[in-house]
Image (spheres, rainbow, N blue to C red):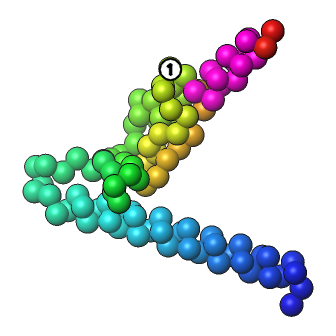
């Protein structure tokens, strides 16, 4: 087997592991919510102590808040829907503009 073949096989293995972890975290989030009494289920929170999940149907307001919020503290925030983080492009844009203006 060539070195290129080994690398692509290794990359495929890493992708499979990452995908399995993502599925496991999503299942854990659903189980966490289903263990609560039905009137206490929020369908959003944190699983595994630090991984955010958002299982409510996405809204335009949440989409804007998570993907374009230049005034937010963090560049990474909870996803609009699912488990994990998303990049706040508005914050990235604000930081780039701030860096460009300070270098003038």
Which residue shows up at 53% across the image and 44% down it?
A: 86
| Image vertical order of residue 40 relative to residue 18, above or below | above
Say left or right for 68 vs 55: right
Which residue shows up at 78% across the image and 14% down it?
A: 103
Image coordinates for residue 95, horizontal then vertical, percent: 64, 23
Q: Main secondary structure of the magenta part?
A: helix
Looking at the rendered structure, the number of numbered marks drawn on it comes to 1
Residue 89 appears in the picture as rendered = yes
Residue 74 part of the magenta segment: no
Residue 101 part of the magenta segment: yes
Image coordinates for residue 8, horizontal then vertical, percent: 78, 76
| Image vertical order of residue 35 relative to residue 97, above or below | below
Please report the bounds of the magenta region as a residue range: 91-102
Where the C terminus falls, by quadrant? top right
Residue 55 appears in the picture as rendered = no
Say left or right for 57 vs 67: left
| Image vertical order of residue 63 relative to residue 82, above or below | above
Q: Secondary structure at mark 1?
A: loop
What crowding class fits label 1: few (fewer than 14 Cα within 10 Å), some (14-19), or many (20 or more)?
few
Image coordinates for residue 56, horizontal then vertical, percent: 32, 47
Which residue shows up at 71% across the image and 73% down it?
A: 11
| Residue lying farthest to the bottom in this orientation | 1
**Pick the front one: 2 or 36:** 2
| Residue lying farthest to the top in this orientation | 104
Which residue shows up at 47% across the image and 65% down it?
A: 22
Which residue in the structure is indicated by mark 1?
Answer: 71
Image coordinates for residue 96, horizontal then vertical, percent: 70, 23
Say left or right for 102 vs 54: right
**Pick the front one: 103 or 53:** 103
**Pick the front one: 44 or 11:** 11
């Amino acid at each position: 087997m060539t070195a290129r073949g080994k690398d692509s096989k290794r990359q495929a293995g890493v992708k499979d592991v990452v995908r399995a972890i993502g599925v496991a975290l999503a299942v854990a989030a659903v189980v966490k919510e289903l263990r609560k009494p039905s009137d206490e289920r929020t369908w959003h929170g944190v699983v595994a102590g630090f991984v955010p999940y958002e299982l409510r149907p996405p809204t335009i307001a949440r989409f804007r808040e998570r993907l374009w919020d230049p005034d937010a503290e963090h560049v990474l925030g909870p996803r609009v829907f699912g488990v994990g983080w998303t990049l706040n492009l508005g914050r990235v844009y604000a930081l780039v503009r701030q860096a460009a203006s300070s270098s003038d």
